[in-house]
Image (cartoon, coloured by chain):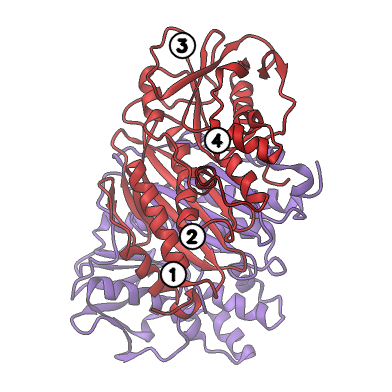
Chain colours: A red, B purple
Amino acid sequence: MEATVGELGEFALISAMTDRLPVGAHVLLGPGDDAAVVAAPDGRVVASTDVLVDGRHFRRAWSEAYDVGRRAAAANLSDIAAMGAVPTALLVGLAAPGDLATAWVLSLVDGVRDECEAAGASVAGGDVVRSETLTVSVTALGSLEGRDPVTRSGARPGDLVAVAGRLGWAAAGLAVLSRGFRSPRVLVDAHRRPAPPYSAGPGAAALGASAMIDVSDGLVADLGHLAVASDVSVRLSSDAFHVPQEFLDTSRALNADPMAWLLAGGDDHALAATFPPDVDLPMAWSVVGRVEEGEAGVLVDGEPYAGPGGWSAFD
Amino acid sequence: MEATVGELGEFALISAMTDRLPVGAHVLLGPGDDAAVVAAPDGRVVASTDVLVDGRHFRRAWSEAYDVGRRAAAANLSDIAAMGAVPTALLVGLAAPGDLATAWVLSLVDGVRDECEAAGASVAGGDVVRSETLTVSVTALGSLEGRDPVTRSGARPGDLVAVAGRLGWAAAGLAVLSRGFRSPRVLVDAHRRPAPPYSAGPGAAALGASAMIDVSDGLVADLGHLAVASDVSVRLSSDAFHVPQEFLDTSRALNADPMAWLLAGGDDHALAATFPPDVDLPMAWSVVGRVEEGEAGVLVDGEPYAGPGGWSAFD
């Protein structure tokens, strides 16, 4: 096969990509036509789109193509889960320089495929174009399975605040890489490859979650969006968070604050949700705070969070 | 309002964008949450994605932001129509340099909005990120309204080949602009703002179209995809095409071939479809050829088309 995507050409590249992509059960018509057809059994489809840019959302020096694929897929699939929906399909737009290695693209596709599989979805279609800036745009679709969507705006005073999935691991891994280290491996790997708790999303919906959000910018920042949308005060208790031993060891070595990773680290794609106080939460969820009346926002131990803020697209 | 998107920041920009976007009837939950919810009344959703890159799919010097928005939306909405579906919603991913004018982005959004309105759809969500390369990625969703999708692979020997919408106008306009001219205005405008025949898509499905494709790369190139997918020979008759007077005048001035615009010009987003021979076609469709048995491909007046080829992503 030709070494670069420019040499290979659009149609051969698309063919090589789709050859690696099984068509899942939700996809009624897969890649190869003007559009795909995806099942939406309850008469609604959940849809979300994200754009990832080389040098900003990933770095080729720090992440293998396979991991970029997993992260790009995870960022979107997790948005679907955060609505309480089950991911069904992904559409992938790739804008790539002509000298990009074909092998890089095919590894990316493998990563997208495997992350889809972890979430129960598959790739239904996409687009390939040339650009000076390597850019991956992903749209995920999902099914609510007859339930109402869990939005950001339903939190009520008295609700519990709980999180599912890893918090701060990707930020800790990024801190390690930023200082030029390659270990601890478990943190670096967490940056390279998130492990969103996909099934916890629809699980929370079934448990009666009143509001939910994907933690992509950082817990305090994202709960801030939820608090504003719900017009409530979210009160977090720092002692409710378990600080992993790896965080303690590594933060000491890097002279960093492990609580900042937990409270402000993004990209793990944990889920944060609010639940009525009488809910019986399964193991996947840890209670970290409570919803109260008051100024819309997030307080940590009763104070505005003074640590580093969340991530903003144009910083 | 701040003059550049970098000064304005992500959240204020998104807010200014969504303020300009009405939420249409198909959108059950619009922008502002982790994902949108869109109606899919017959239990299926049609989905297509396209990526447009500055300097490649549009040029800021030649197209106003408003027109880039219309074109970006049209390219995707037309893919939905080409399946025989009615467009319902759009998701828009914008990757933009920090020094891009806020006004440019808001005009783009106006263009997307108006093209959506022309197709009966609305913007359900999106993403905004920073990138050195201005890139617009659009995903369109649509409803088949209970019909089967019209794919590329259903053409049968004996079928008529017909087109709906303008052919070659965008290419003629591009030729005018490429030579440094700004008129004839009607051609330049056709390049800047396509007018896809959206309702002809579901109309063709209702008429029993056996295969259909959106003409984005050029009629011969796109019918070539249809011919290969259907394993048939598509025979076009050049004398079946009406050559507009504007093409004759302008091609003479530019020393160009007007048939090349008709047969190989892309970006008008006409629809090309095949129909059983006994179909009673309405005015929107012009018969330009016939499907026969034989080597999969397209012949013009019995010969392989010798004119310029279609557009390829990595040329």
Contact (Cβ within 8 Å) of mark 1 with mark 4: no
The CA distance from mark 3 to mark 2 is 42 Å
- From the top left corner, tell me how far across and down residue B238 is, in percent: 38, 85
| Mark 4 and mark 2 on one chain | yes
Which residue is at the front of the view, A13 or B239?
A: A13
Q: Earlier in the sequence, mark 4 or mark 3?
A: 4
The CA distance from mark 4 to mark 2 is 26 Å
Q: Earlier in the sequence, mark 3 or mark 2?
A: 2
Q: Tag 4: residue type?
A: Glu
Q: Which residue is mark 2?
A: A65
The CA distance from mark 4 to mark 3 is 33 Å
The CA distance from mark 3 to mark 1 is 49 Å
Asked if residue B180 lies left or right of residue B156, the reply is right
- Between disc 4 and disc 2, the foreground one is 4
Q: Quadrant of residue B14?
A: top right
- Between disc 4 and disc 3, the foreground one is 4
Q: Earlier in the sequence, mark 4 or mark 2?
A: 2
Contact (Cβ within 8 Å) of mark 4 with mark 2: no
Q: Residue, x 65% and y 53% (percent of image)?
A: A180
Residue B45 visible in this rendered orientation of the protein: no
Q: Tag 2: residue type?
A: Ala
The CA distance from mark 1 to mark 4 is 34 Å
- From the top left corner, tell me how far across and down residue A245 is, in percent: 54, 31
| Label 2: few (<14), some (14–19) or many (≥20) C-alpha neighbours in 10 Å | many
Q: Which residue is mark 4?
A: A246
Q: Earlier in the sequence, mark 1 or mark 4?
A: 1
Q: Which residue is mark 1?
A: A103
Q: Tag 1: residue type?
A: Ala
Q: Which residue is mark 3?
A: A276
